[in-house]
Structures are given as C-alpha cells and as structure tokens.
Amino acid sequence: MTGRLDGKIALVTGAARGIGEAIARAFADEGAFVIMTDIVDAAGLVADIGPQHGRFDRLDVRDEEDWQRVVDDVLAREHRLDVVVNNAGITGFEAEPVPHDPEHASLEDWRAVHATNLDGVFLGCKHAIRAMRQTGEGSIINISSRSGLVGIPAAAAYASSKAAVRNHTKTVALYCAEQGLKIRSNSIHPGAVLTPMWEPMLGSGPERKARMAALVADTPLGRFGMPQEVAALCVMLASDEAAYMTGAELTIDGGLLAGSAATPEAD
Ligand code: NDP
C-alpha cells in the first residue's frame, strides 16, 4: 500500500499531545518518518507509532540552539528534511488565569506568549529553510489560529502572535519562491479543537458539558473540531498534492469565520 507521504522526513513541534500528536500519527500512517519534538517526553507516542516510523527529540521552540542541534541531527541521520510543522503554541492561560486583555496584560506575559508562538515559528521557518536547501524543496506548515484572523479581547497576546504567524508564513513563501526554491509555506487557522489546551477553561464536574456547549455556541457546525481533522489538512499540505499551494491560509473552524448567522427577518 502506498502512502501520500511515502519517503518524506517530517519534523513536528509540540508533538507530545493534542494537534501535534494527531499530526505525527497521521504523517506516520501516510508513510512519513516523523521526528516528534516537544519540551515534554513523547517516548510513549514513539513506542505506539513504532520506531520504524519516527523518533523523539527534545526541542524547545524558543531556543535557537535546540533548533540548530535537532535539525543538524536530522540531516546527519536522515539526510534530508521535507516537512516542518510549526505546531507548538501556548495561550498563556496554562499556569494560572492571568489577565490577557489589552489593558491589563503584563509585558512579561505578552512576551512569553510571543516567545513560543512567534519566535518559535520564526526559528522553525529559519532552520527549515536551511535544511530544505539541501534538496531545494519542502513544505512548511505553520499552525496559526482563527485568533490570527480576528481580534480576541481576552487573549491579546495570543491573537497578536497568531496574526504575526499568518503574515510571516506569507513572507517565507515569497522569500523561498524568490530564491528559486520549491519550499512552500502555508498557514492553518483552526477554530476550537478539543485538545488538552482547553482543559484549564473546561474544568471537570457537572459544569464541564455546559462550558463546552457555550464555547462552541457561535460555531455553525455546533461542535469542537477534532485534532485528526486538523491533521488531515496537514497531510494534504505536506504531500505533493499541494505542490501549487504556497502563501495560503486555510481555515478549519466549523464555519465560524464564514460570516454572520443573522437572518434577513431579524435585520
Ligand atoms: P496543547 O497544549 O494540547 O499541546 C501543545 C504541545 O506543545 C504540548 O505538548 C506543549 O507542552 C508543547 N509546547 C509548549 N511550549 C512549547 C515549547 N516552547 N517548545 C516545544 N513544545 C512546546 O495544544 P494544542 O494541540 O491544542 O495546540 C497546538 C497548536 O494549535 C498551537 O499552536 C495552538 O495555538 C494551535 N491552535 C489550537 C486550537 C485549539 O482549539 N486547540 C485552536 C487554534 C489553534 P506542555 O504540555 O509542556 O505545555
């Protein structure tokens, strides 16, 4: 059986759980060899996927020395790098519920979110291009957010960082084309996707179901997206099927950004 990513070497950041884990699993299913990276160990995931389909390496996306080491290692061991998914990201709400609105967010919290979400993507693109120059082709996939396309009053740093990811993706696409490289760069903009990222907001107990329903009340399809649905989009962008796609932004949000649900009668 042939896979859509047969023979490709892919690196995924933030692969230990959530969307990153789903991407790693989908890539392996489609025949890629996956370097799963994260700040937390993903040995269990590697064992599950099978060592013939990938390996784990520790990579803090904020740290350029980590990028240098991990990408050098991929080139030494796998001799090429075809796909990089810059997936690792934080909301800033993980540790404790601190204010993230434009009036009360602290500079420290603002910088921390940008360090992971934006500096991390900048470094990921930089080292992806360096590695992909060896073959002159590749696919960079940046996981932005629907929050990168609209303002989010309670998550100013998150929205700002994701908007910058959208724009940087296009800069990278144009730069690579200008350089005569077949390195494509595209961004994905998910709406609410059910992953551990939501746990601090959902909590447990009898209120959990109501909180989940409230969070997707404005979503036309009326539910959370699943990590596997985002992963399917990544498979397409990573594959040669997407050879003519670069600088694109793809929403996957259950219709959230399609427009207003207002009816003519109500207007
Ligand atoms: P999760 O929090 O479930 O998983 C993110 C993973 O990234 C975790 O394993 C986390 O480790 C890791 N990580 C955090 N910081 C770093 C770092 N500095 N270097 C390397 N790895 C790191 O998130 P999701 O799977 O939900 O989100 C994945 C991406 O999708 C993010 O960029 C997010 O912004 C984006 N996204 C998610 C949406 C959603 O609704 N879930 C919607 C729109 C976009 P640790 O557990 O230690 O923090």
Image: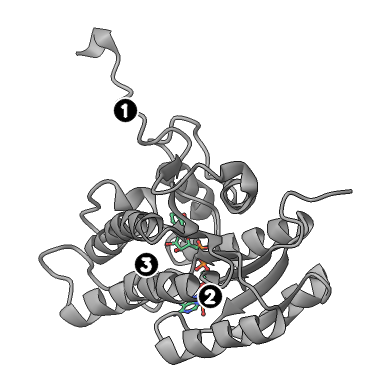
Q: Residue at x 56, y 49 (%)?
A: 237
Residue designated by label 1: 259
Name which residue type carries label 2.
Ala
Name which residue type carries label 3.
Thr
Q: Which mark is residue 91?
A: 3
Give the SS element for disc 1: loop
Q: Is residue 186 left or right of residue 109?
A: right
The residue at the far top in this view is: 265
Instruction: Tell me if I can see residue 13 in this picture.
Output: no
Q: Is residue 70 left or right of residue 178?
A: right
Q: Quadrant of the C terminus?
A: top left
Local packing at callout 2 (Cα closer than 10 Å; few below 14, some 14-19, many 20+) is many
Instruction: Tell me if I can see residue 44 in this picture.
Output: yes
Query: Does the numbered disc 3 mark a residue whose Cβ is under 8 Å from ligand 1?
Result: yes
Q: Residue at x 65, y 59 (%)?
A: 22
Residue designated by label 2: 131
Give the SS element for disc 3: loop
Q: Give the CA separation, mark 1 to mark 2.
A: 40 Å
Q: Which mark is first along the chain, 3 or 1?
A: 3
Q: Does residue 2 lie above or below 65 as drawn?
A: above
The residue at the far left in this view is: 103
Q: Position of residue 195 (x, y in %)?
A: 55, 59
From the image, state whether disc 2 or disc 3 is nearer to you.
2
